[in-house]
Amino acid sequence: MVRADDHQLKLVANRALQSRIRAEQKSAPKPTRVRTKLLAGRTPRTVAGAWCASLALLLITSGCSPQHGKPDFRVELEDFFAKNRLGPDDFRITGREEDESDKEGKQANREKLQFIATAQEAAFGTPDKPFLFAEVGLRSDDPRWRALEPEERKKRLDLKKIELAAGAPGGDQDGKQRGLFRQHCAHCHGVTGDGAGPTAAFLNPYPRDYRQGVFKFKSTERGAKPTIADLKRTLIEGIPGTAMPSFMLLPNDEIEALVEYVRYLGIRGEFERDLASGLLAQDEDIPKTGAELLENYLNRIVEGWAEAETKIVRPPEPPPANTPEELHASEQKGRALFFDNKIGCAKCHGPMALGDANDGAAEKERLFDDWNKDKTAENAGFWLLPKIELKPRNLRLGIYRGGRRPIDLYRRIHAGIPGGPMPVVGTEQGGQKGSLEPEQIWHIVNYVRSLPYEAMSRPHAERATALLKERN
């Protein structure tokens, strides 16, 4: 596990490298500016050369450029480059390359990285002035929006709401609050939604990184996006047991604007990563038109968000538990399943459901989520935040991050928790049969809900002993 002091040394080293490179830049010729036409009728955008774009890989400040006084979107692919073993040397032409093909490869990488920055701004605009292709989103007061069928509107973002959440905090002449995301969210989630805002390093767990399009607590199947209602509920209720507060006191239109902005950042982040994967990791050619960009990258991402409503987990009615006897019988069945080795609940949550099964375990046996599992001491400088361990929920506390309603617990067990090691056990839509039937999942739900009231000595002594032996 990367120690905090190691991480700080990495930050200092990176900042020193930034200063040295900027000093070299002052005496170097200015980078060539390029223009890229991405969509017919769209004004070509002028962007800095690929050298400046590659420097963005070294920036640590979340979403803020050192050359400007206001927050800006930037090429933010530190983790992507770490996983694909790419660094500044893969983009820097020094004149000491081994052969011409090496130089050509670096030049191609520079052009592709520059294109990613160009495409991002052309497709999504800036934090102060968001933009969307008409195929991705429109203002709800635009005649083209009103002409769409209701089902077609669900496939597009509402740019009017996004504009309400974008920009610097403040109000307009009518007293309408604007800049909502930067006011309420960016200090934790970052300007780009990378989950690495100024306060993120002090929090455990870290704020959600929207860019991967993975959200843990939702009503849909594991691989599906959250619905608008899921995101809205998270904003209103917060996430118990974390630093994510409730925004229940905000007016409904402001909550809806924030939800739309989160979706906007999620689509933008996935687009950046998919584009980088295609161009840099898979060596695909740069798209020549906006239509090609939409067809090969954006449409798939937007469609994934649009179909979330069709992926909601809708469990059947639970088995009868209307009397103390029926509820007790259900809890006992759930308890047996919870401690069943084939199901494996206790292997993470522990023999007494305290979430301590992996405490003190070796590094390879500890649990990490998808945002931390690839971090190592060797690649620590590529990451915005140091590595932290994932702690399974202490079910004795009765605090459930994804909601405490029975249906919330059912969905956590059925679909697992995306981005983490908690697996799918239910039968997903169009997928293979799960390891548990719906009735069995309901029994586990009833048992989990009883744990805060069950005596700590209740679990079988031999079962607890066996689990401890397995761990040791």
Image (cartoon, grey):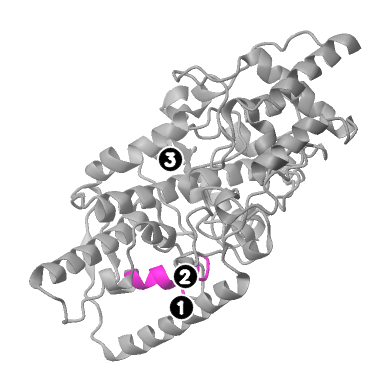
In the picture provided, is 375 more to the left or to the right than 246?
left
Mark 1–mark 2 contact, CB under 8 Å?
A: yes
* Callout 1 amino acid: Asn
- Whether residue 287 appears in magenta in the rendering, the answer is no
Which of these two is toward me, 321 or 375?
375
Q: Which residue lies furthest to the left in this view?
A: 100
* Sooner in the amino-acid sequence: mark 2 or mark 3: 3
- The residue labelled by disc 1 is 14
Structural distance between the alpha carbons of marks 2 and 3: 39 Å
Residue 351 x/y as whole percent = 75, 36
Q: Which residue is drawn at 67% across and 16% down?
A: 440
Q: What residue sits right under mark 2 in the picture?
A: 381
The secondary element bearing badge 1 is classed as helix
Q: Nearer the viewer, residue 381 or 253?
A: 381
Q: At numbered mark 3, what does the secondary structure look like: helix, strand or loop?
A: strand
Residue 159 falls left or right of residue 349: left
Going by the numbered disc 3, the residue's amino acid type is Leu
